[in-house]
Image: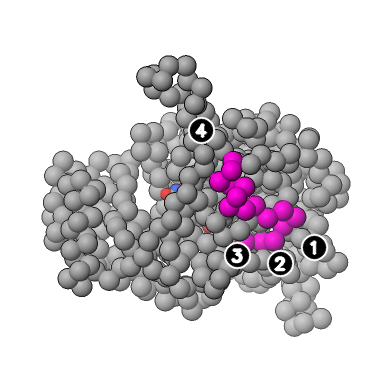
Amino acid sequence: MSQLRTLLAELPVAAQAEVAVLGGGPAGLCAAVAAAQEGADVLLVERYGFLGGMATAGLVNPFMPFQVADLNTPSPAAPKALKLVNGGLFQEILRRLQAAGGYEPQQQAFDPETFKQVAQELVLEAGVRLRLHTALLGALAEDGHLRLAGTASKSGLQAIAAEVFIDATGDADLAAWAGAEYEQGRPEDGLCQPMTLNFRMAGVAPDLMPSRAEINALYDAAQQRGEIDNPREDVLWFYTTRRGEIHFNTTRVVGKQATDADDLTAAEIEGRRQVQQMVAFLRREVPGFADAYLAATGTQIGMRESRRVRGDYVLTAEDVLSARDFADGIARGCYPVDIHNPAGTGTVMQPVPPGRSYALPYRCLTPRGLENLLVAGRPISADHAAHSSLRVMHIAMNVGEAAGVAAAQSLRRRGRTRSVEVATLRQRLRERGAVIDEV
Ligand SMILES: Cc1cc2nc3c(=O)[nH]c(=O)nc-3n(C[C@H](O)[C@H](O)[C@H](O)COP(=O)(O)OP(=O)(O)OC[C@H]3O[C@@H](n4cnc5c(N)ncnc54)[C@H](O)[C@@H]3O)c2cc1C
């Protein structure tokens, strides 16, 4: 036995649950809520003091498209009706955000502080046991069965035991440390999509702001003069729920891995340097920003991509771009392939066919070689390009919800996730309001 395995085996067990969810981002919180609503005793473990993952700690905004045009709308002149692609708990979260004044439907923008509150209420109402300020540090697996997750917190080093585990860490930490196969980055060189430290400017005079094209022209000129060395090709910005506040998803840190602490440190430092450069540029050059100030940066730099677990099926770019359906589909997506250049300038966008969506198979959630572990959220089994589509928050929520329901159903089969009856799982997801059939 290696020293780490010996250590993990000897850790005091702090908590036991039927289902343990590691990571409380969009996928993890929905997984925990769904499993608890389906009757399981659930523990949700999160390293920060609040829920939401990239949606809160990463200051990611807004929701990308979750509806497609109904191409069968009778009159070509009439506005196209919209068909919902992402339902279930995602829609419940939208409803609660809006009721609390934290959602702006025109922009699909939400307020991150309201998101934290809504997520916490949902989780507690469902009866989930919450463990915050607790980071995963390792996993103990034997004979294809995950026995324990090791954690580090102010209570020291401890273990968590469960019948079924759900890895919702965004980086597949639990699966990788349990020995699951995975891939990372693009096939030719392993480079992942760039990281971005999101930030917000407040005190903006929106009526004075020039067009997107004019802002980009000013940015180009500043890049040419050497005043901006961010490799991103343009300024990516969004309105928020507050007048006078603009959200920027525009720094670009390339060549760093989200699974390496030294890379993460360097990326945070570089992201913050780029934010300062952008803030100075906006205040100096862009009408409407003269009196604006930096209102917030993400608690952490945003990671678009890291590990992708090898599951029983690997979703491909072709599946996404041909809007493929699957008999074991548990969620759907309509967001394009969206690859920010892992090496520098440029972004590749390839749409899903108009009015269509693709299915995400249950087999993408089951890591090869491990029986009582499901992966949810962005690290599910997919190639680099398919991942760039399925990574968005509402798809992560839908996949998380499916993982939670599947985990609860697997308890009748001693936590064997491959023994879940797919027809029963799909029927239950439909009853919960999830969209899983071709729309
Ligand atoms: C810069 C950027 C811009 C984006 N723009 C958009 C956008 O406009 N719209 C959109 O819909 N999506 C966007 N995305 C994608 C989206 O935000 C993420 O892919 C999505 O949040 C993934 O959800 P998740 O739950 O799988 O992972 P995450 O959101 O990463 O959540 C993982 C959770 O696990 C916790 N965790 C991680 N490791 C550990 C550990 N070892 N121990 C304990 N807890 C741990 C984290 O703290 C976090 O709470 C963007 C992403 C980035 C980075």
Which segment is the magenta one? 307-323
- Element at label 2: loop
Residue at 72%, 57% in the rendered image = 311
Please give the residue where the numbered disc 4 appears in the rendered image. 355
Rendering quarter of residue 405:
top right
Please give the residue where the numbered disc 1 appears in the rendered image. 369
> Residue 120 vs residue 296: left or right?
right
Along the line of sight, which residue is nearer the eye, 325 or 12? 325
Where is residue 376? Give x, y as percent.
Answer: 64, 52
Mark 3: which amino acid?
Answer: Arg
Q: Is 53 contained in the magenta span?
A: no
Please state which of the two labelled residues, at mark 4 or mark 1, is closer to the viewer: 4
Mark 1: which amino acid?
Answer: Gly
Please give the residue where the numbered disc 2 appears in the rendered image. 181
Q: How crowded is mark 1: few (under 14 residues within 10 Å), some or many (20 or more)?
A: some
Specify the label residue 307 is tagged with. Answer: 3
**Residue lying furthest top:** 74
Question: Which badge, 1 or 3, comes first in the chain's sequence?
Answer: 3
Residue at 65%, 32% in the rendered image = 437
